[in-house]
Amino acid sequence: MLPPLLPLLLILIVGSYSYLGDASFFRLSPGAVLAVVLGMQALLVLAAYRHRGRLLAAGPVDSASELLYQFGRKLRKLRSLSLVLLALCLFNFGWGELVHDRWHFQGLLAPLAEVIWMLPVVGAWIGFWLLEYPLESLTADQEALAAALEGRKFAPMPPRWAYVLMQLRHGMYLPLVLLLALALRRLTETLLRHWGWGSLAYGAGLAVTLAVLLLAGRLVVWVWSTSKLTVEPLRSRLETMAAAGGVRFTDIRVWHTYHRVVNAAILGPVPMARYFLITDALLARLDDNQIQAVFAHEVGHGHHRHLWWYLAAFAAGGFAAAAVASAGMSLWPRYDTFWQITNYALVAVFLILVFPLISRLCEHQADWYAAQCMAARPQPLVAVAGGGATEVTSAVAAVVAAVDKSQESNDLDDQADYLGLEVAEAAPPPRLPPLVAGAERFAQALLAVVGLTHRPRDRKGWMHPSISDRVALLRRLARDPKAVEAFNRRQRRLRQWIAASLVVGVVLVVLATIYGG
C-alpha cells in the first residue's frame, strides 16, 4: 500500500498552490510546459524500470519477497521525488497557470483543476505499480505454492490492471475525500452567496467540510471494496470485544485485497460511520486467537479515541503554522509571500516529523490495551523467565470475559502450541503472570503479521513504530509496574500537549489576525 504521508503531501502541494498562486521564474509555451511536466515524471518511471532490470540481472535472491522489498525501497524514493518535481512544475514552470487560466478550470470547476494538477504524479505512480506487478506476481506464486503444501486456500494474483486499480483505490482515498469536501464546500458557499445569504457562507462551508470528514468512513469502505464479515463465531467474539471496550461502530467488514495486504484498521471518529476492517489475507493466514489479538489493538484505538486526538493534533499543527505566518505578515508585511510559504512549510514539517511521534505513542497505547485484553483470556500454563507483573484492570478484563464463555477449548497443549512452546507432561510449570501471558500472546500475533508482510522487524513506518520496538516495550510493561506508570504518564502528557497546543494555536491565530487588521 502507498504510505498515507505521500497522498497527504500531494494534497498539501496542490492546496498551497491553490492559495499562493503562480510564482514562475521561467515562462514557457503551453506545449513546452506540458512536455516538461510529463517528461520529468516519465524519467522517474524510466529510472524505476532500469533499477528493476539491474535487480533481476544481479542474480537470484533468497525469495521473490526480498526482491520486491528491494525494489520497493527504490520506489519510495522515486515517489517522494515525483512530489518535488510536481511542486517545481506548479510554482516555477507554469503548470498550475496552464490548467487554471488557459484551460479555464475556474470557479466551481476549480476542484477539477486540482485533480488535473495531480495527474502527472498519479500517472508516474501507476507506472511504478505496473513495474512492481511482475515482482508481486512472483511473490504471490511462491505464497500460493506454500499455501498448497499447507492445504489452505490462497487467492490468485489479480490481472495487471485490476492490481493497479486496487492500488489506486487504496492509495488515493485521502485526496478523494478531501477534494470531495472542498468541492462541496465551494458549492455551498457559492449557492448561499447567490441566494443572498453571504454572511452564512463561510460557516456553512466549514460545517459541510467537517461533515464530509466525519462521515468519510462510509465512502472509504465503498472505495476499498469491502463486504460484511459473516464468519461465526469469530464475528460474535469481535463484536463482544468492541462492545465491552465501549466502542460503538457501524459494521465489521472484510477488506478485499486479493490477499496482497495483511492488515486491520478502524475508520471513522463517529459511530454512524465507524468501521472495523480486516483484510482477506489476515483472515486466511491467522488463526482466530491471532485475529482477536489484532482486533483488540484496533479496539484500543477506539477505546482511547485516537482518531479524535489525531484530528486535534492536525488542527493544532495547522493553527500553530497559521499563527506563525500571521504574526510574520503582521510584523513584516513586505514579505507576505515568504510567510505564506512558511505556513505550508511548517505544516509539511508537522506531517513529516511531529505527527509520526504522536501516532507511534498512540500505537504503543493500542498495543498495551490489546495485551491487557489478551491477559484476561485463559492463560497458558507455561513459565516465562522474568516474572512479576501488575494485575489486569477489571475494565479491560471485562472486554474478553464474555468472549471466553464461547471458547470451546482451554486445553493445555493447545495453548502451548499457540505460543510455540512445549509443556512437560509429568510436571506442568507454573502459570504465567496475567500481563506477561497477554503481552506474549499479542506479541506473537504481531510477529505473525510482520512475517506475512515480509517487512523487516526493525523498520519503522510513518505512523507505526518498528515491530521490534513494539514487542520490546510490551514485554517490559508486562514485567515492570513502574514502566507502566511512566508509560501512562507519557500518554497523559501527550494529550495535555495536544489540547494546550490547540487552544494556544487558536488564540494566537485570532490575536495575529486582529493585530494584523
Image: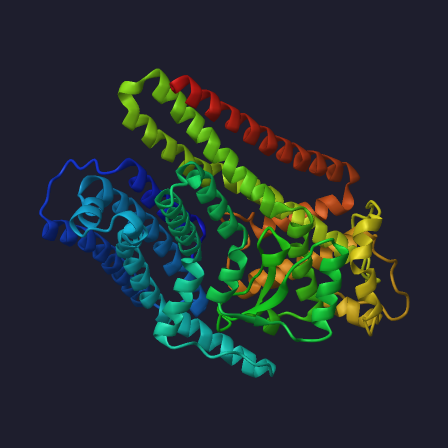
Quarter of the rendering containing residue 25: top left
Residue 420 in sight here: no
Q: Residue at the spot x=47%, y=31% of the render?
A: 319
Q: Position of residue 295 (x, y in %)?
A: 66, 60
Give the quarter of the figure containing the N terminus: bottom left
Residue 175 in sight here: yes
Q: Residue at the spot x=63%, y=35% of the render?
A: 495
Quarter of the rendering containing residue 429: bottom right
Q: Is residue 502 left or right of residue 163?
A: right
Q: Position of residue 274 (x, y in %)?
A: 60, 57
Residue that protrudes farthest toward the left in the picture:
29
Query: Is residue 473 shown above or below 287?
Result: above
Q: Is residue 420 left or right of residue 426?
A: left
Residue that protrudes farthest toward the front in the picture:
196
Q: Please tell me which residue lies in front, 464 or 36.
A: 36
Query: Is residue 233 shown above or below 119?
Result: below
Q: Residue at the spot x=79%, y=48% of the render?
A: 386
Query: Is residue 351 shown above or below 378?
Result: above
Q: Is residue 341 left or right of residue 507?
A: left
Give the quarter of the figure containing the C terminus: top left
